[in-house]
Amino acid sequence: MDIEKIVKVQRKYYETDVTKSWKYRIAALNRLEQAIIKWEPKIEQALKKDLNKSVFESYMTEVGMSLSELRYVKKHLKQWMLDKKVKTPLAQFPARSYVKAEPFGVVLIMSPWNYPFMLCIEPLIGALAAGNCCVVKPSNYSPTVSAVIKGMLEEIFPQKYVAVVEGGRAENQSLLEQRFDYIFFTGGVQVGKMVMKKAAEHLTPVTLELGGKSPCIVEKTADLKLAAKRLVFGKFLNAGQTCVAPDYVLVQKEVKEKFLKYVLYWMKKMYGNHLECREIYPKIVNEKHFKRICKLIEGEEILAGGIMDEASLQIAPTLLDHVKPESPVMQEEIFGPVLPVLEFEQIEEAEQFVKERAKPLALYLFTRDKKVEQRITEHLSYGGGCINDTIIHLATSYMGFGGVGSSGMGSYHGKDSFETFSHKKSMVKKYNWLDNPVRYVPYGKQKEKIMRMFLK
């Protein structure tokens, strides 16, 4: 595949301006919606093969979320495309000021393997809604889903509008050598740094959706049984391979024993003891990641789980106790079904523990104390999160989702997706029936007096 040629063809097509009208954009989104519905069985089969996802989990976390986002964007697109009127300073009278959203042009979307369909399609929805041409690069680690995405998009869009590039590092490198007008990347921190470095060579703006060690803080006033249930759900969904999964839990010492009993109860109730649910329980994406996660468990105190099946690449939901901050499992994002437990005595200790580390993509706090809630949400910096729940803050089109610091930059979902893939063009339309002479040379004391009055 000639990647350079694809980009040139798309740029030529974009310059015809056909992608900019509301009619063209809404037609594209309608075709995408119908294609997802038509291809749903193949999408679910591909997710089963690549990650062993059940039909229920595939729809809940991938297909259903993509359709929900798509329908929300379609409903609001016409309104978002309207010029936004803003006030005009008195010094510029008579004039009208407004902000016009225009597409960036030809954009690159690079998606990961953990939610390989949803994390490819949702950015694409925003890019098409904003009027761009798109090159999509699915992950090579989920090849079956990648092939389905390619087949589905090629069926409904010409390559000059939406192109899918499959492959691994060589294709990634070739793509990053091209000049795009915007790059949207979801993945790990190290590759994210490389993407940003390459983008800088062309001064290409980027959105980076990365990750990090997202903490879960359980304070003594929390509803412990419900907190444990929601923690177990958020942590072990997709076998822990979720960028916003709770990476570790900080629990207040005086309620730790009781809380962990509830965690063990819900782990057993949801997943059993010995991978009995292996038919519907997701697998680790490949052998490399399987061995990496297994190594992180070595030498730690296992309260539950720890069962590893290399043949199926499955690791049972695993709970680790008495984990030290300097342990290997606390030095990198786990991205697997392993939950380390640490304790604190005062909420200030938990706050300081998080503050001393890189800004996480998500933070979860379980408490019924409003002062604790206010303290944590105001004093700590993180991409987003939940109070008394986990991960659901990303499952909405009503607000944006993104990271901060080393966990990423930029946001998307709903209106944020449209704005991410749009350049906001500030405009002033000056009327001709009056031309204020104050700004023109020669200047003088009287003009200066008037100028100062206008610019107070």
Image (tube, rainbow, N blue to C red):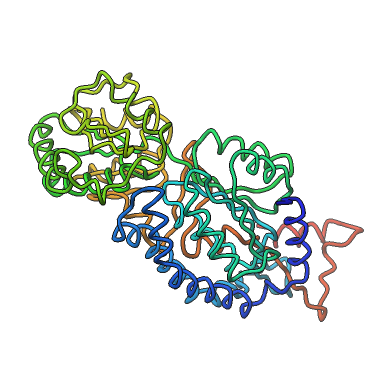
- Residue 316 rendering spot, x and y as whole percentages: 23, 37
In this view of the protein, which residue sits in the foreground, 29 or 170?
Answer: 170
Kindly identify the residue that appears in the image at 30 percent across and 40 percent down: 246
Residue located farthest toward the right when viewing the structure as drawn? 442
Answer whether residue 38 is visible to the viewer in this image.
yes
**Residue ID at (62%, 80%):** 23
Quick check: 407 above or below 73? above
Residue drawn at 28 percent across, 34 percent down: 309
Name the spot of residue 439 as percent of width and height, x first.
83, 62
**Residue appearing at x 34%, y 32% in the figure:** 354
Does residue 139 appear to the left or right of 46 in the view shown?
A: right
Q: Position of residue 287 (x, y in %)?
A: 40, 33
The quadrant the C terminus occupies is bottom right
Q: Nearer the viewer, residue 386 or 91?
A: 386
| Along the line of sight, the residue nearer the viewer: 244 or 56 | 56
Q: Is residue 95 left or right of residue 368?
A: right
Q: Is residue 368 visible?
A: no
* 257 in relation to 202, above or below: above
Does 306 sit left or right of 155 as displayed?
left
Q: Is residue 34 left or right of residue 244?
A: right
